[in-house]
């Protein structure tokens, strides 16, 4: 099986398109939780393939997009300290803080590095024992186990100069927060496949049952998405609300228990503030108390006074499924990939970046 070519088969996709258009008899609002799905949907023209009854609603599943401004300001404050090497993933560098960004700070001469792999931070710390190395860790359940591995390696090598600013978040919590907002009208969900490799598909069952909404755990190729949409259409017609695991070739019911146990060993749930969603209880992760000596938020002064979001930017509304990028007055004008006003345009997985790249009017 060719995991790319076979899942972009034109004839199969068009066959699914005909079935979806035929069987979709009433409006269906599908929220794709993950930004990766948003990009695939726009890149492959899926809205044109599924017919007028299917409306894709973009969710909060981009770790850069959901990062609140105060956490970005904390990162900027830490990165500006003397004797610090600040490490994070590339997209975070361009997200605007209250006054500046990590990218601009790097341009001023501060040692701020974009990591290809989180494990690179171990080597950086070993090679710079006279520096304080701070790892700004982000991501959903997909990347959290890798951070746990880095913590374990840090302890194994006895590194005293490596610290962690943990910003990992979970998928189920924001889904519940969105569904508890009566102004948001969501009929079904596309669940993120890569997250589900870690969590398993069963993690969504309580959400499907509680809110009576079907969920399809879907891969990112067009054939994956089309098959998932057809399932959601059929569930709508049958008035069922089950979790459909389209990505069975990788995702298991219980997920990756080894990764789950590793995360639990070093991290624990905590309240987390989300851009556009506010503070959601037990939706983030932090280091366990016994590892406080590695926690940058405990070791350093991270107090900041953050400004509100740019009033022209509606990223918060987009992340809650209440608006599309086209609804933003500055989309594609003042706000563009070269001059992003909000995180949805900064991130490679952001909805605004997807629309700008694939579907600009």
Image (spheres, helix red, strand yellow):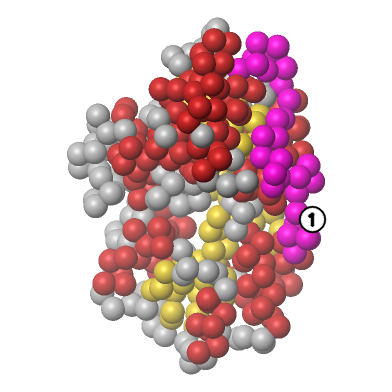
Residue that extends furthest to the top in the rendered view of this protein:
25
| Neighbours of disc 1 within 10 Å: few (<14), some (14-19), many (20+) | few
Asked if residue 292 can be seen in this view, the reply is no
* Residue 275 part of the magenta segment: no
Q: Quadrant of residue 189?
A: top right
Residue hosting label 1? 257
Pick the front one: 18 or 267: 18
Q: Residue at position x 58%, y 47% from top?
A: 2
At which x and y percent is residue 52?
44, 14
Looking at the image, residue 198 lies above or below residue 78: above
Q: Residue at position x 70%, y 12% from top?
A: 239
**Tag 1, which secondary structure?**
helix
Looking at the image, residue 3 lies above or below residue 83: above
Quarter in which the C terminus is drawn: top left
Pick the front one: 63 or 68: 63
Q: Quadrant of residue 83?
A: bottom left
**Residue 351 relative to residue 229: left or right:** left
Q: Residue at position x 45%, y 22% from top?
A: 49
* Residue 235 part of the magenta segment: yes
At which x and y percent is residue 252?
76, 45
Q: Residue at position x 46%, y 52% from top?
A: 64
**Residue 84 relative to residue 287: left or right:** left
Residue that extends furthest to the bottom in the rendered view of this protein:
130
Asked if residue 325 can be seen in this view, the reply is yes
Q: How many marks?
A: 1
Looking at the image, residue 145 lies above or below residue 282: below
At which x and y percent is residue 54?
49, 18
**Residue 265 relative to residue 32: left or right:** right
Q: What span is colored magenta in the figure?
A: 233-262
Q: Quadrant of residue 107?
A: bottom left
At which x and y percent is residue 260?
75, 57
């Amino acid at each position: 099986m060719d995991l790319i070519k076979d899942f972009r088969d034109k004839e199969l996709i068009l066959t699914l398109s005909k079935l979806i258009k035929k069987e979709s008899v009433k409006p269906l609002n599908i929220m794709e939780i993950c930004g990766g799905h948003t990009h695939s949907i726009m890149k492959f023209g899926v809205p044109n393939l599924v017919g007028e009854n299917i409306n894709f609603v973009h969710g909060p599943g981009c770790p850069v997009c959901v990062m609140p401004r105060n956490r970005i300001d904390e990162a900027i404050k830490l990165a500006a300290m003397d004797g610090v090497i600040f490490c994070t993933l590339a997209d975070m560098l361009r997200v605007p803080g209250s006054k500046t960004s990590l990218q601009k700070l790097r341009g001023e001469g501060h040692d701020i590095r974009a990591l290809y792999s989180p494990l690179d931070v171990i080597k950086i710390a070993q090679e710079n024992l006279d520096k304080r190395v701070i790892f700004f860790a982000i991501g959903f359940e997909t990347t959290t186990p890798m951070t746990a591995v880095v913590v374990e390696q840090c302890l194994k090598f006895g590194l005293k100069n490596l610290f962690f600013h943990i910003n990992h978040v979970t998928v189920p919590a924001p889904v519940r927060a969105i569904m508890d907002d009566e102004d948001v009208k969501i009929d079904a969900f596309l669940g993120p496949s890569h997250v589900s490799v870690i969590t398993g598909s069963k993690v969504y069952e309580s959400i499907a049952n509680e809110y009576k909404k079907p969920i399809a755990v879907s891969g990112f190729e067009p054939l994956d998405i089309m098959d998932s949409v057809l399932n959601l259409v059929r569930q709508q017609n049958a008035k069922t609300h089950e979790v459909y695991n389209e990505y069975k070739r990788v995702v298991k019911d219980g997920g990756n228990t080894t990764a789950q146990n590793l995360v639990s060993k070093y991290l624990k749930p905590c309240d987390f503030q989300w851009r556009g969603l506010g503070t959601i209880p037990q939706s983030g992760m932090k280091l366990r108390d016994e590892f406080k000596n590695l926690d940058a938020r405990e070791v350093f002064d991270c107090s900041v006074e953050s400004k509100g979001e740019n009033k022209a930017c509606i990223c918060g509304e987009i992340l809650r499924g209440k608006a599309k990028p086209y609804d933003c007055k500055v989309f594609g004008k003042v706000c563009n990939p070269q001059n992003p006003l909000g995180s949805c345009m900064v991130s490679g997985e952001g909805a605004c970046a997807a629309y700008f790249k694939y579907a600009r009017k």
